[in-house]
Image (cartoon, rainbow, N blue to C red):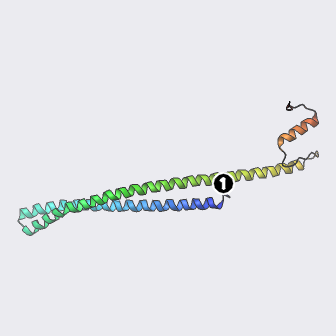
Amino acid sequence: MNTPKPMKRLLALRVIEEEREETELRKQRQLRQACMEALQAAEKRTALAVRALHTALESGDRAEAISAEMALACGPLERHRLQRRLTQLDAFVEMASGAWQRSRLRRLQMETLVQQGETRFRREAQTREQKALDGWFLLSRPNGFAMRPDESFQREVSSSAERNGTAHAESVQE
C-alpha cells in the first residue's frame, strides 16, 4: 500500500540482484552443458577412430591407419583438457548457485519487511479511521453526553457508572 519508498526501492534492487544472479547461474550451467557435450563428442570421435583404425588395418590402408592412430593419440589430450574445464565449470556452477540462493533469500526477507510495513500502515490507518468514527459518534450522541476523541472507552464506562449510581471498584491508595 503505502510502504516507505526506500523499502520499495530496496526490494526492487533485491529483485534485480536475484534476476542477475539467476542469469549468471543459467549461463554457467549452459557453459557446463556445452563442455559436457564436447566431452561426449570427443569420446565418440575416439570410438570412431578405434573403428577406423581396425578397418584400416584389416584393409591394409596404411594412410588411414596412421590418421586413425593420430586421432587416437590426440583423444586423451582433448578429453583431459575438457575434464579439467568441466571441473572448473562445476565449481563456477556451485558458486553461482550459492550466490543466487543468497540473493533469493535477501529478496524474500525484503518482501517480508515490505509486507510487514504495509500491514502496519494499514492497521494504523484503520485505527485512525476507527478513532475518528468513534469520536464522531460520541460527539453526535443524542443524550448530550460528549466525550473527547482522545479519551478511552474505559473512562466513559467509569463516568457513566458514577452517574447511574452503579458501583465500581476504586483503587485503594495508602
Identify the residue at the far front of this view. 174
Identify the residue at the far left of this view. 60
Which image quarter: residue 44?
bottom left
Numbered disc 1: secondary structure: helix
The residue depicted at 67 percent of the width and 51 percent of the height is 119
Q: Which percent across, then down, holds residue 156?
A: 87, 41
Q: Which percent across, then down, holds residue 109?
A: 56, 52
The residue depicted at 48 percent of the width and 62 percent of the height is 20
The residue depicted at 9 percent of the width and 69 percent of the height is 63
Above or below, comparing residue 154 to residue 132 in the picture: above
Residue toward you, 144 or 107? 107
Horizontal arrangement in the rendering, residue 34 relative to residue 166 (left or right) = left
Q: How many marks?
A: 1
Horizontal arrangement in the rendering, residue 98 relative to residue 34 (left or right) = right
Residue 36 visible to the viewer: no
Q: Amino acid at mark 1?
A: Glu
Q: Which residue is mark 1?
A: 118
Q: Which percent across, then down, holds residue 74?
A: 18, 64
Horizontal arrangement in the rendering, residue 156 relative to residue 86 (left or right) = right
